[in-house]
């Protein structure tokens, strides 16, 4: 959905190297639409949460989006780290 994409893009825009650098979420194993939606936005399944839900014995996938810094951001961070170690 367009609204869902906008919400995720807003969350992703708040990520950075030095503060929040990932988003985690759980998706029901039977919710293929949600899994594909998040995968399309750059999320990856990183583990299975067995018997996760209270209302069923269904498992969940823990999905993660990791922040990937731009090259210029990595250079600035490296310079800052060198100055602090100085």
Image (cartoon, grey):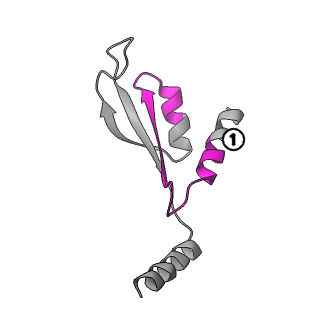
Callout 1: SS:
helix
Residue 15 sits inside the magenta stretch: yes
The location of residue 19, given as percent across then percent down, is: 51, 58
Residue under pointer 1: 6
Q: Where is residue 14 in the image (x, y as percent from the top left)?
A: 61, 53
Q: Which of 31 and 63 is in front in this view?
A: 63
Question: The C terminus is located in which quarter?
Answer: bottom left
Left or right placement of residue 11 versus residue 21 in this view: right
Residue at the far left: name it. Answer: 50
Q: How many marks?
A: 1
Image vertical order of residue 83 relative to residue 43, above or below:
below
Q: In the figure, 9 relative to 35: above or below?
A: below
16 sits left or right of 82 in the view? right
Question: Residue farthest to the bottom?
Answer: 86
**Residue at position x 39%, y 25% in the image:** 29
Where residue 11 sits in the image (x, y, percent)?
Answer: 61, 46
Segment tinted magenta in the rendering: 8-36
Residue at 45% in and 29% down:
27
Few, some or many C-alpha atoms within 10 Å of disc 1 (few <14, some 14-19, many ≥20)? few
Locate the N terminus by quadrant: top right
**Above or below for 29 versus 16:** above
Residue ranking furthest to the top: 55
Magenta span includes 34: yes
Q: Which residue is drawn at 70% across and 34% down?
A: 3
Percent coordinates x, y for residue 34 in the rendering? 52, 30
| Residue at 47% from the left image edge and 24% from the top image edge | 31
């Amino acid at each position: 959905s367009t609204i869902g994409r906008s919400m995720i893009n807003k969350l992703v825009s708040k990520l950075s190297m030095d503060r929040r650098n990932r988003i985690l979420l759980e998706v029901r194993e039977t919710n293929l639409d949600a899994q594909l939606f998040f995968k399309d936005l750059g999320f990856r399944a990183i583990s299975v949460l067995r018997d996760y839900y209270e209302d069923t014995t269904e498992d969940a996938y823990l999905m993660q989006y990791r922040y990937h810094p731009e090259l210029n951001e990595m250079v600035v961070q490296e310079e800052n780290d060198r100055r602090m170690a100085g």
